[in-house]
Image (spheres, rainbow, N blue to C red):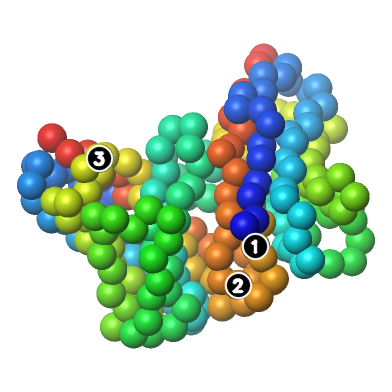
Amino acid sequence: DGGITQSPKYLFRKEGQNVTLSCEQNLNHDAMYWYRQDPGQGLRLIYYSQIVNDFQKGDIAEGYSVSREKKESFPLTVTSAQKNPTAFYLCASSPGTSATEQFFGPGTRLTVL
Amino acid sequence: AQSVTQLDSQVPVFEEAPVELRCNYSSSVSVYLFWYVQYPNQGLQLLLKYLSGSTLVKGINGFEAEFNKSQTSFHLRKPSVHISDTAEYFCAVSDGGTYKYIFGTGTRLKVLA
């Protein structure tokens, strides 16, 4: 089955630690995205990538980093510089034009202890 | 910059009653519109999309939406809701020619028995 997988589903982190969230897709999509979701705020774009080895900052990139070394993978690192990292993180992909929908993974809930 | 407004943060409705969830977007030369549904602790699933053509779009689970260019609206409707429709609904827009999608803040639909 084609789709997007995110792991882990739940993640706990101590303050001051970096943590990496995994996102893998087997849909052969060119574009991939990371969103942060907080109650009442909808989805806010962190980073997106249109092609391998290239990515752009979204609206709330501070304290986050990404890489896109393979077409199917787009990991997100939440660094210690992110002041309020507790949130639900969603990864998405799309074929690479704006005239198509995005496909979403199941999400990772990150909690900072 | 493109923006999306979902006017209602919460909509309670009795089972088998009709419902309308409102979405307005800022004007753009070309725009593609989407409605997604999210169940608790899950990713987003596409309900329907408007790319071009007929302004009345039918989606999954009996939902439909009407694109109104003059009012820059894309309201979601269902003639008779079920308990299982209880979820959060997001309206989204993508600008023609970009890879970015803008999401509204979501409307929480609660269907009452």
Q: Are marks 3 and 2 on the same chain?
A: no
Q: Residue at x 89, y 66 (%)?
A: B53
Q: Residues within 10 Å of mark 1 (few under 14, many from 20)?
A: many
Q: Which residue is mark 3?
A: A84
Q: Which residue is mark 1?
A: B94
A28 horizontally vs B11: left or right: left
Q: Which residue is mark 2?
A: B98
Q: Residue at x 32, y 78 (%)?
A: A68
Q: Chain of mark 1?
A: B
Specify the amino acid type for callout 1.
Ser
Q: Are marks 3 and 2 in contact (CB under 8 Å)?
A: no
Q: Secondary structure at mark 1?
A: strand
Q: Are marks 1 and 2 in contact (CB under 8 Å)?
A: yes
Q: Position of residue A7 (x, y in %)?
A: 28, 58
Q: Residues within 10 Å of mark 2 (few under 14, many from 20)?
A: few
The C terminus of chain A - image quarter: top left
Cα–Cα gap, marks 3 and 2: 29 Å
Q: Are marks 1 and 2 on the same chain?
A: yes
Specify the amino acid type for callout 2.
Thr
Cα–Cα gap, marks 3 and 1: 28 Å
Q: Secondary structure at mark 2?
A: loop
Q: Is residue B6 above or below residue A96?
A: above
In the rendered image, is residue A4 in sight?
no
